[in-house]
Image (tube, helix red, strand yellow):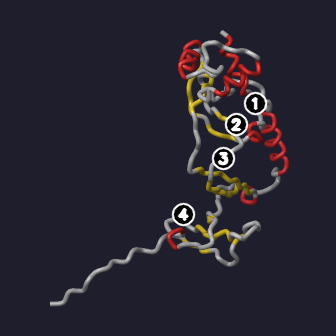
Amino acid sequence: DKGGEVINIQTNPGRQPSDATVIDIFDEANAHCYLEKQGRSVEFFRNNLPGRDWVKLFMKRHPHLSIRFANNIKRARSTIDETVITQYVDNLSDLTKDVPPDRIYNYDETCMSDDSGWSKIICRRGCKYPERVINSTKSTVTVMLCGNAAGSSISPYIIYKAGHLWITWVGNGPMGTTYNRMLLLNGRLPRLAPSLGIPTSRPPPPTRLGVSLSS
């Protein structure tokens, strides 16, 4: 059964094939492209394009595969392997050898998408983190976090991409949160609004509205 060869057409060239090698098999166009590159024509496929029934039979012929949801990552990140991480940790240990923990800060950003774009894929059973390499992304909200090795963290700083900062956007935030907005300039790069940081610790207490009754 040469159908298992289709699993290898999406192997990332930046890393060696492993159990995490996956393919979005439910996009039948992948199998179609593979057949076209191999110069093969399957008479059972209409226009040489397999259907969902073929996918079901493919899964039965390969019981070591399973269907999972994959996280989308960019190709540049997918090239990082264990060797690169080990070298980074070794270099970082030498640089911070005599530095106090409260002087060592690390910050990183993460994106939260309103549409994750997850899709079902076929991967080897036991794969913990199936990922799909994709360069296009949906609209996202970027969050940057910062803390030191002693366990302390810096209060959040939230920046909205808008011309105005509405009062409803600066409530119910974490303790010590600072808010700002990004000015939108015509044909120019956006920049932060000057002197517009609005620190807030917690939303103001609610006020009770009522009518004073007198006899």
List the single residue furthest toward the front.
47
* Residue denoted by label 2: 133
State the CA–CA distance, disc 2 to disc 3: 11 Å
Rendered-image quadrant of the C terminus? bottom left
The CA span between labels 2 and 1 is 8 Å
Q: Quarter of the image holding residue 100? A: bottom right
Residue at which label 3 appears: 137
The residue under label 3 is which amino acid type? Thr
Marker disc for residue 158: none
Nearest the eye: 147 or 102: 147
Q: Alpha-carbon distance for marks 3 and 1?
A: 19 Å
Please give the name of the residue rendered at 20% of the width and 86% of the height, measured from the top-left corner: 213
Q: Residues within 10 Å of mark 3 (few under 14, many from 20)?
A: few
As drawn, the residue found furthest toward the top would be 1
Is disc 1 surrounded by few (<14), some (14 to 19) or many (20+) residues within 10 Å?
some
Tell me the element at label 1: loop
Q: Residue furthest left?
A: 215
**Which quadrant, please, contains the N terminus?**
top right
Q: Position of residue 37 (x, y in %)?
A: 76, 21
Relative depth, front residue between 33 and 191 = 33
Disc 2 residue crowd, few under 14, some 14–19, many 20+, Cα 10 Å? some
Please provide percent x and percent y for residue 199.
Answer: 59, 73
Pointer 1 residue = 12
Q: State the residue at coordinates (54%, 23%).
A: 52
Q: CA distance from mark 4 to mark 1?
A: 40 Å
For residue 174, the mark is 4
Element at label 3: loop
Question: Which of 54 and 60 lies nearest the eye of the viewer?
Answer: 54
Q: CA distance from mark 4 to mark 3?
A: 28 Å
